[in-house]
Image (tube, helix red, strand yellow):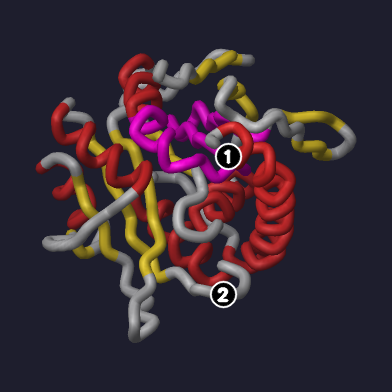
Amino acid sequence: MSQPRFRIKELRPISVKDGFLVDGFPSAGFASAIASESLINTTGFEVAAIIDSDTFPPVSLIKDGEPNYPTRIFVQNELNVAVFSSYLTLHESLHKQMARFMLSWAKKHGIKYIITSIGVRAPNQSEQIIAAGSTKEARRKIQEVGIHVLQHGTIPGIPGSLLNQGMTNDQNVIAVLFNSMEQGPDFKSSAQLCMAISKLVPGASCDISTLNKEAERAEKMIKETDTEAKNLKEGIYQ
């Protein structure tokens, strides 16, 4: 079986050397995608590239009357931050390849830190944020901003693949673990995660007063896209 090929078409100059790349692919629930969407909308990001693949379901996302690819790269050059934003929940067979692709793009643009995230279901509904780092420098960064470093645990999906590949390639990867609700909107989880990202990324901000509104809009669009793509994806991966 051939490896999936991801393609990037860059639409504008990208200058994020020594900066940050935020992974906004949905993981457990939609909080990761919602938090990255909120970050984009409150910190002056612009679309800089689109990501496509023959393995992606053929879906167009209509926003303000215009068609958009559901997976795009947003950039804020002044803050040295890029965001991989996606309304698609990738099949698990693509997780390792997408992590490898993300690391390659980060290396090309001189990214210093990759920030990824995944929800965990804490039995006591703890609001404490913890994070894992792929390198000593990444773990030091986590501690510097007042976040606890995960000592023991299991991290699956794209975040887990990014950590493993980051460790072997000496790329700083920080995986933020946040409490995720089993049911209902991920407003609280999204706010929790967005605040953690704003601690790690200098200059980034989350407008908590409008986050619920943004989260509701983003979650609706992500769920609609995910539903429309579901049958197509099931056909593709059979």
In primary-sequence order, the first of circles 1 and 2 is: 1
What residue is shown at x 50% (from left), y 44% (from top)?
24
Q: Amino acid at mark 2?
A: Gln
Choose top left, top right, bottom left or bottom right for residue 104: top left
Q: Position of residue 146 (x, y in %)?
A: 24, 63
Mark 2 residue element: loop
What residue is shown at x 53% (from left), y 48% (from top)?
36
The magenta-colored residue range is: 70-99
Going by the picture, which residue comes out furthest to the front?
A: 238
What residue is shown at x 17% (from left), y 26% (from top)?
169
The magenta stretch spans residue 122: no
Give the alpha-carbon distance from disc 1 to disc 2, as whole Å. 21 Å
Quick check: 85 left or right of 63? left
Q: In the image, is residue 117 above or below residue 76?
A: below
Q: Position of residue 78 (x, y in %)?
A: 49, 30
In which quadrant of the rendered image does the N terminus lie? top left
Q: Amino acid at mark 1?
A: Ser
The magenta stretch spans residue 91: yes
Residue 183 - label: 2
Choose top left, top right, bottom left or bottom right for residue 110: top left
Q: Position of residue 52 (x, y in %)?
A: 59, 22
Q: Residues within 10 Å of mark 2 (few under 14, many from 20)?
A: few
Front one among 25 and 77: 25
Residue 86 - label: 1
Quick check: 175 left or right of 139? right
Quick check: 77 left or right of 92? right
Q: In the image, is residue 190 above or below residue 98?
A: below
